[in-house]
Amino acid sequence: MSEPSETHAPRPEEEPSTGTSRRTFLKILGLSGAGATAAACRPAPPHIDQKLIPYLVQPEGITPGTNTTYASLLAEAGPEPLGIHAWVRDGRVLNLEGNPDFPLNADGMSALGLSTLQDLYDPDRVPGPRKKGGGDFQEAAWKDGIQALGKAVQDGDVVLLTGTGTGTRDRFAEEWAKAVGARHVRYDTFDYAPLRRAHEIAFGRAEIPTYAVDQADRIVSFGADFLATWLEPTALGRRFAHARDIEKGRHARFTFVGPRLSLTGSNADDWLPARPGTSGLVALAVAHVVAQKKGGSRGLELQGVLATYTPEWAADKTGVAADKIQKLGEEIAAAERPVALPPGPESQGADATDACLAVALLNHVAGAIGTTVQFGVGPQRGQGATLAEMKSLAGDMKNGKVRTLIVAGPNPAFTLPASAGFAEALGQVPTVVSLNSHLDETTAAASWILPGSHELESWGDAEVLPGAWALGQPVMQPVFDTRQREDILLQAAAAAGIKADFGAQDFAGYLENAWREKHRASGSSQRFDEWWFDTRRQGGRWEGAPGKPTSVGLSRAVTSHAFSGGAGAPARGKFDLVVYPGSYLYDGRGANRGWMQEIPDPITKCVWGSWVEMHPDTARPLGLENGDEVEVTSESGKVRAPVYLYPGIRKDAVGIQIGQGHTHYGRNAAGRGVSPLDLLPDTVDGATGSLAYAGVAVQLSATGQKAKMVKLQGSDLDYGREVSEIMGVEEARKAIGEHQVDLSELVEAAWDSDPMSPYRWGMTVDLNACTGCGACVAGCYAENNLAVVGEERCADGREMSWIRIERYFEATADGGFQTTHLAEMCQQCGDAPCEPVCPVYAAYHNPEGLNVQVYNRCVGTRYCSNNCPYKQRRFNWFTYDFPYPLNLQLNPDVTVREKGIMEKCTFCVQRIDRAKVQAKEKGRLVQEGDFQTACQAACPTHAIWFGNLKDPTSRVSRIAKGARSYHVLEELNTRPAVTYLRDVTHAELAQET
Amino acid sequence: MAEPANVSGVLAHYESIDGTRRAIETLREAGFDDLEVFSPVMCPELEEALGIHSSPVRRWALIGGITGFTTANLLTIGTSLAYPLIGQGKPIVSWPPFIVIMFELTILYTGLFAMFSWMVHAHRPKLKLSPAYRAVFSVDRWGIFVPVDDRNRDRALDKVRETEAVEVEA
Amino acid sequence: MADHWDTEERGLTLADANRDIMRPIMVSSWRYWTLLAFVFALVVWGCIAWAWQVGQGLGVAGYSHPVMWAVYITAFVFWVGIAHSGTLISAILYLFRSGWRTTINRAAEAMTIFAVMTAGLFPLIHLGRTWYFYWLIPYPSERFIWPNFKSPLVWDVFAVGTYFTISLLFWYTGMIPDLAAIRDRLRGWKSKVYGLFSVGWQGTVREWSHYRRAYLYMAAIATPLVLSVHSVVSWDFAMAIVPGWHSTIFAPYFVAGAIFSGMAMVITILVPMRWAFGLEDYITDYHFDNMSKLILLTSLIVAYSYAAEYFITYYSADPTEQASLFFRAHGSFQGPFWVMTFCNVIVPATLWFKKVRRSASAAFVVSIFVNIGMFYERYVIIVSSLAHEYEPYSWGFYRPSWVEISIIVGSFAWFFFWFLLFTKALPTISIAEVKEHLAHQGAHEHG
């Protein structure tokens, strides 16, 4: 595909390499007619003028202007594999939704997952093969690159560095490495080695169990940020919401143990602020109490081990009051189905395994094993190299044991702490060939870049649960001149003249063979091609999986296990450092995606940068205010960042997020913020050798300068203004128990003044279900062509987001606070103040009660925004551009706005209209479930519901009548169509004054 | 200045309002009624002396006001009905906001009508000035022009000479 | 010191009035032209800034998310306010037969016209899509789209439009006899031009009689118009539910403020003008005394409004409203707030002293303070209210950018540019009325 001018014409022949893959691609998707997809895409940059060649023969199954949905898999998106439905139109993937059949995230999505769209269309991807020459990279031909790689492979001493995996891609890498005599190293930023090791010690099973939080009636997290970055946040988020579904009579109390309230912590009812890395000791003490209280066989067999670890013992080591530990223990003992989640990376210290073990024992004495903690059915994760192993690899690289390093996926030069010395070692390797799609820190050191295709352009699969296989099929042709990583390796092997039979010419064939085996194993009566077609249609095979949990018994070894005492309090004038993965940047892979930079961090509401979280009571005496720059110093390094005052962190700790501080990786990431990894020594967990993120002491010194810190939220409190509402659980139970408060009046109030219309679109947002993850915001960005405006403009409050999550603190009786996350979009008021002030009727009320904004009519007086009490209107201060190829992701159903125009949430009016057309074709009205808004579709916890308020049976009107309903700023009588359901907490709230 | 034959008469200059007024009275008693009086300043006394009591301008002003009010009604109500869009649940035709428009247009039309009607009634604009006009009349002198034919000229001259005229042109 | 315009003592005659007042038109100096050139340069600079803004988008201004209206609207309200005193002096004082208006009404009316011309620019400058400004004007279009007469912005179009037209006519009508006088002093083409504009006025009593009534009716309607225009402008804010705007006292409050700032601007202009053209015989301490009294009165009304606003807010016990006004005086915009209070309440209090009132230079200084204060008043009301609305999430800040500042400076230049042209081309004092005054005085002596 050299000249772009060809790209719109169907091409009979291809150069063999991609040709074959394309042929398979056609063969596979032919039935669903995606052949045309393939032919239609690979658009050329706009500046190249190209012939537009219309279809001579309309390809079967493709209707231009309508979405074709393909099931696929995102395995490299972030912490978890996501089963997705990709919306493809005219050969371009436009949007992603969760795959409802998928056993983990089901129909929910994560912000990080949605943002892989921007990763796919990232203008900073390496557009084709590149050769290092004279300091920077020169364009090169694929065949030369393949030759070079082949040559390097022949020379031997090859290391193939890939991410971990549970599927065919991983198996292939292994096989390929064996075939060419290379060493295969797998590496993931965050490995779960301590957790596996702990369970090996405790139950003789080195695996990750399923945490059935949904079954639990008492939840404790000893640090795992399981709603944002730990293990499988989207699935766990759903389970968490299920466990707290107050209308169903459930509301599991949730306690968070850890130095800093992460997104997960902000959803907790109680907070035990344990020193970093000591939450395991709290777990021990809690287990001690539970064993006493609960007794029973399980208690007895462990009392010996636990005897010494009393709450008092833990108290002075962890900084958590003994009575609080005691109380927690008693509550867990009293609970029927409690669950305790282990520490995540941020609380993983030098004794991480002990900590995980402590939690495992707690789960054991509490009787959670087998009920809420299930073995044999847990998420399948490949085990990557720990820091120790990576350091030995770095050692080999340094002393010339590695002649060629092939990087296929990970970016260790960034994600490993500087102290690991990987980056320098990289310089010692004669030949580094990167198959990464971006010019990241590791790739920057490469002599050759042979860019691999994006996940959405590649074949792949994964065993997400025992026996549950998800299939990732390419949903569009590569945007750039890239190839499937495995194909590059295959071609290199061929070029190197290695005689090895992979059973297929390309990876697509290789993967298909792998699935032939599964087909045989499944003993299905279907012919393979039919079975294969169904598999692709539903995105994998998980019949009967994961099956029943296997029962496990405590191993003798434990009873004699000696737990380490943990680190003491930091020396005077020093602070414990809390290093945690970014909710949106994760390990830094989100850093070049505009959405992930511009959607405010769920806790700090900051964008486009780094910050040092400090407790106000600590910062103020030091004369530090928001935005004052400080230098944070450890033995291993120093970073400079602005201070952020956060009452949700221990007074003797400071927190810095992982993800920023890139030196390469693209326009949005490079040179932005700092990486706390530079502060970490190469301390490891003794038992497993995986990196200890916690337990580092740092010094702080103010530089006396103000640093740029862009916080989008004006005030953290709502001053009792009926913006965010929270109620005690008893109050809520009472309200629900007694009777359904009749709010029909309120619902009718939202009706539009047109009685003839069968519809009045409305929405409900359940603050109790909302975890604040921000998936809805990313979904809106993807659907509505929202512009990314950048740091400078965000500083002026000019971000374009149509839906935002407002994070408010509500004081509690004990002097602490509860966090509420309030997803707010245009309230589509029945009495909209924005409407009458518009001199040109650009804002008016349509017959379905929508408060519509007519872009073409808008002259930009901005009066509507002044008069909107919810401040939900966004103005186009400039004409924002979508640099190629990001413009390919623009939704053709939605206008791209020019400068001088007001815009706002439309309730996805384009989806409403499509639904109406489809309903009309069927000769009926739009019904429940015909369509969803983008935010609703993305929400993993179903906190957002959308529908027709005029239909009394519709779910949305039933929810709106619920006992917890309220309208934001109700006293203004704007009669909003969005009804909120109050947040519910177990904490005792302070009397509002 | 060359006077055309058909217009002829006597022009007298005065230096004060009172002198002018007395002169007018004398002349009118003598039966010279269609006097043309020039004045550098606005002086109602002279109007009385000449027996000018009212001006049709006020009627025009009223008509203007009514026209403006009607136009405003047609405009606001008419367009609202022709282009009916709901905003904040207000009725399509809602009077209170329209009153502002009606008020403004009423005033606008009144003003315009008043302005143009005085010009029309004063036979303005004109490029050519009356032959009897003298530049001093815009400085500090009043003038009375008595249009007479040759028969009465002498009688007019006599009358004029009785007044406080500082200068007399025939 | 005379408590009336002591023309006898000064022994002025009608001919003197003619000569003195017309002098600037007859002779001119290089100083005038350099000043004009300088002012014009500033206007050009403002235009460049505006062009840049139109090209780039409004983002080059300092707007932030909650603060979507800022100095442009401030300037709009400021200039509309300035425009008020002109018609007030010429119309209302005319109806009240206050003699002291005679020598200042012409300049004041001219100021009105130019102020409205300046104010009229800002809604355009402020629009996101200036090139579609005409969509606010009701005209039958092929799109069958009409403006929304429920929107206060459309009221503005009508109010300001009417005000401009009427003021212009009023000013012009009053000037016709003077134009005729100039016509008669001049020769050649200039004479022809003035002749054209004087519509062939020759001051016959018949012309005077129609003219007098027309002028009277115009004064009669201009009076309610003056009051309505700034009320309508104030409703741009009062009609919105923004805390700090949504208040019923706005109409009278703004009208008082308008007269206050307008009078100040009249003084700011008259003092240098009187000095430059040597009109001390016509614009005397007596006139400044009267204007100062008017300023003092309106200053008291404004001060009262400030107090009332706070009291009512306190009394209403509406937390949002209270937060907003507390923020106004103690938040990020407290600087402008206290500047405003100082300039509009404290400084004018000096006018209680006759000495100050009767000294042109003192009055000039006070007037400058008042101008600054009133600009800040509008700034405070608009910006600080928007920055601190209902949703705490969306509280924000605003700082004007170089583009906004350039355009504001340019607008002042634009105003003075027109005024300079006026002083050169037209009589800055109503000759006819001065002579009327003298003539009748003469009449009384004789009779």
Image: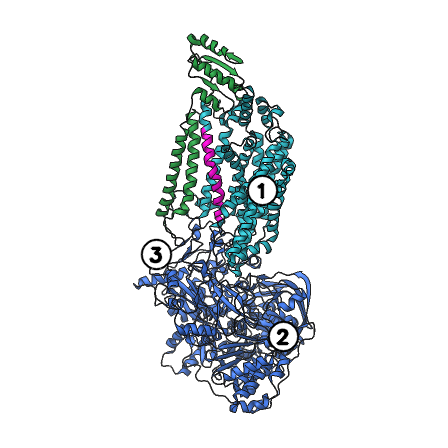
**Residue C183 — which label?**
none
In the image, the segment drawn in magenta is: C213-236
C-alpha distance separating marks 1 and 3: 49 Å
Tell me, what hue is chain A?
A: blue
Of A196 and A813, the residue lying toward us: A813
Q: Colour of chain C?
A: cyan
Query: The disc labelled 3 sits on which kind of residue?
Result: Asp
Label number found at residue C410: 1
Q: Is residue A100 visible?
A: no
- Mark 3, Cα crowd under 10 Å, few <14 / some 14-19 / many 20+, is some
Q: Amino acid at mark 2?
A: Arg
From the image, state whether disc 1 or disc 3 is nearer to you: 3
Observer-side mark, 1 or 2, equals 1
Magenta span: helix, strand or loop, mainly?
helix
- Mark 3, chain letter? A
**Above or below, C16 relative to C127:** above
Q: Is residue A769 left or right of residue A630?
A: left
What chain does mark 1 sit on?
C
Give how far apart the Cα atoms at labels 3 and 2 are. Answer: 75 Å
Q: Quadrant of residue A130?
A: bottom right
